[in-house]
Image: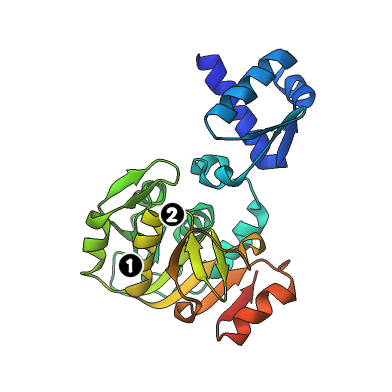
Amino acid sequence: MAAAHARWSALLEMLTRDGRIEVEAAATELAVSTATIRRDLDELSRQNMVTRTHGGAVINAIAYDLPLRYKAARNAPEKERIAQSAAGMVKAGAVVGLNGGTTTTEVARALAARTDLTESGNDTSFTVVTNALNIANELVVRRHVKLVVTGGVARPASYELIGPLATELLAEITLDQVFLGVDAIDVTHGATARHEGEASINRALARRAQQVVVVADSTKLAQRAFARICPVEDVHVLVTDKGAPTELTKPFSAAGVKVVRA
């Protein structure tokens, strides 16, 4: 069974890398038989992780809810540039909110690498408030970062803590900025998430911040997901990749959102 789990992980990594896989190519890459790959893909399909096609499999809407590690490779260069640009907005001593997601994880890493944020006389450079366990895990060893983690129930797909225990803590604090990773954003529906529990905690983060910054690569623009985080009127800045078409970014500018291309 351990070997099977290793193959399933490898197949999911291939799917996030390429968007689709063919049985024969996957069998060659993993050095197993085509029959084994077919059985593996059938099993992943039964788990609603992939959609089977003739001769292979593709990522479907369910793939957006894959565990975070399987999504990290998608649009990685764009997300890194977005993160660097977003992290550059933070000033020394700021209190920053971060929700879960691949792009906000990159923002956290970019912030941790900044050595210019220390205020005179302070041991810590800035404060990070997050509901993301993976971000907390990376920042807890950074002595110059004051880390505050919300309570809540852990959601394995995103490593986010959700529920009333998380939102109750946020009602007691204020944030200078919040950097929100989203599943989709458009002018009509605002920033949205696929899971209502994540949308709720993300909305609470946005309400406690003086500035709301959405970090989203161009594949998220002019799209909508199930649950609204906040209307576009509540978004101050949208940081996206430089490849975002003008027809996708222009409506945000017209709505009063500052658009930054990284």
User: In the figure, 102 relative to 22: above or below?
Assistant: below
Q: Quadrant of residue 94?
A: bottom left
Q: Is residue 253 visible?
A: yes
- Which element is circle 1 on? helix
- Which element is circle 2 on? loop
For mark 2, what is the residue?
100
Q: x%, y% of residue 164?
A: 24, 57
Which amino acid, mark 1? Answer: Ala
> For residue 25, which numbered disc appears in the image?
none
Q: x%, y% of residue 221?
A: 63, 66
Label 1: how many Cα within 10 Å (few below 14, some 14–19, many 20+): some
- Comparing 108 with 159, the one in front is 159
Which residue is depicted at the point 29% across and 46% down?
153
Q: CA distance from mark 2 to mark 1?
A: 14 Å
Q: Quadrant of residue 184?
A: bottom right
User: In the figure, 41 relative to 115: above or below?
Assistant: above
Please state, as top left, top right, bottom left or bottom right, where the C terminus lies in the image: bottom right
Q: x%, y% of residue 12?
A: 61, 33
Query: Is residue 111 shown left or right of residue 46?
Result: left
Q: Quadrant of residue 251?
A: bottom right
Which amino acid, mark 2? Answer: Gly
For mark 1, what is the residue?
204
Query: Is residue 23 shown left or right of residue 122?
Result: right
Mark 2 and mark 1 lie on one chain; the one further toward the N terminus is: 2
Q: Is residue 71 visible?
A: no
- Give yes or no for contact between labels 2 and 1 (Cβ–Cβ under 8 Å): no
